[in-house]
Structure formats: structure tokens, C-alpha cells
Amino acid sequence: MTISLHTIKPKTGSATKRKRIGRGNAAGQGTYSGKGLKGQKCRSGVSNLKRLGMKQVLLRTPKVRGFKSHRPKNQVVNLRTLSVEFKDGSTVSPTTLLAKGLIENPKGGIKILAQGKLTLKKLKFKKLKLSETAAEEIKKAGGEIL
């Protein structure tokens, strides 16, 4: 069979006519036209948002996005500042760092980072977190991690 304009048909079930609502009982959707009995919902010009009430106000208010952690961040001290502030052979601990004014709270997390060089000072580190590169630099300089 050859295809020509008068033999082309749409696939079965793809072309369905829309239901014309409110055109009398003979049309299939007369009387209440699928809206039920009386009330605001059955009238024309009433959107679904009209019936939300308080929820509509909540939807309009701008929300604060994102997340903020309540866990405090580590206080950072660099090797550069330690080489300036501490003498050879001294101990670096949260209390000594607080005394020198390098940290604000000795109970919070304190981490030593490897920015700058530790100029051949044999420092002793107590109760402090260290980055891997900072630990290597300290061992290279002859320091101890207790």
C-alpha cells in the first residue's frame, strides 16, 4: 500500500478531542460541569491559591537559603608566626598561644598550618592539631610533637 495524503491517519489513541465542559447534559458534562455543588470553589475566577490562606503568606516570604554550622571552626596559627614569637626549645601549647595573643580561646580547636618556614627552631608541640606538611616541617627543624 502506498502512502498518500488521504491514507495518512494519526496513531490510535493519540488524537482525542478535548471534553467541552458546561455545554448541556447531552454533551456529557452539563449541570455542575465537574465542579460539584454550590460554594466558592464552584464559581468562576477563583484560583486554588485563593483558598490557601496563611500558606499563601508563607509562600511569598523570602527564605534564607543555605546552612551554617554551629560547630566552631579551628583557630589557625601558621609556622611563620611561631618562628617569630617563640624562642628555640620552648613549648607550644594552647595556653602559651593564648598568652602570646595568637588565639582567642584555648578550649576551641587550634590547628598549626605550614605557611612560612620554621627557621631551625626546636619547638615542642602539646595538645595541638597539625597539618601533615606542618608536622613534616617541624620534624625537619628538629622539633617534637608530644
Image: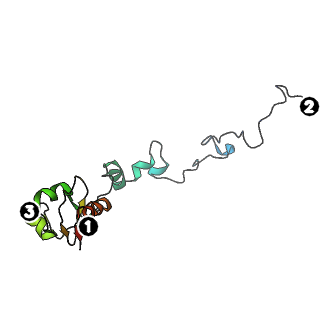
Residue 46 point in image, percent of width and height: 44, 45
Residues at circles 1 and 3 in contact by the CB criterion of under 8 Å: no
**Mark closer to the chain start, 1 or 2:** 2
| Quadrant in which residue 131 is drawn | bottom left
Q: Which residue is mark 2?
A: 1
| Quadrant in which residue 11 is drawn | top right
Q: Which residue is mark 1?
A: 129
| Residue 25 in view here | yes
Point out the image quarter for the N terminus.
Answer: top right
Dot 2 amino acid type: Met
Residue 101 shows which numbered tag? none
Taking the spot 65% from the left edge, 42% from the top edge, the residue there is: 19
Point out the image quarter for the C terminus.
Answer: bottom left
Q: Which residue is mark 3?
A: 100
Taking the spot 67% from the left edge, 46% from the top edge, the residue there is: 28
Label 1 crowd bin: few (<14), some (14–19), many (20+), radius 10 Å: some
Find the distance from the CA under tag 2 to the CA under tag 3: 96 Å
Nearer to us of marks 1 and 2 is: 1
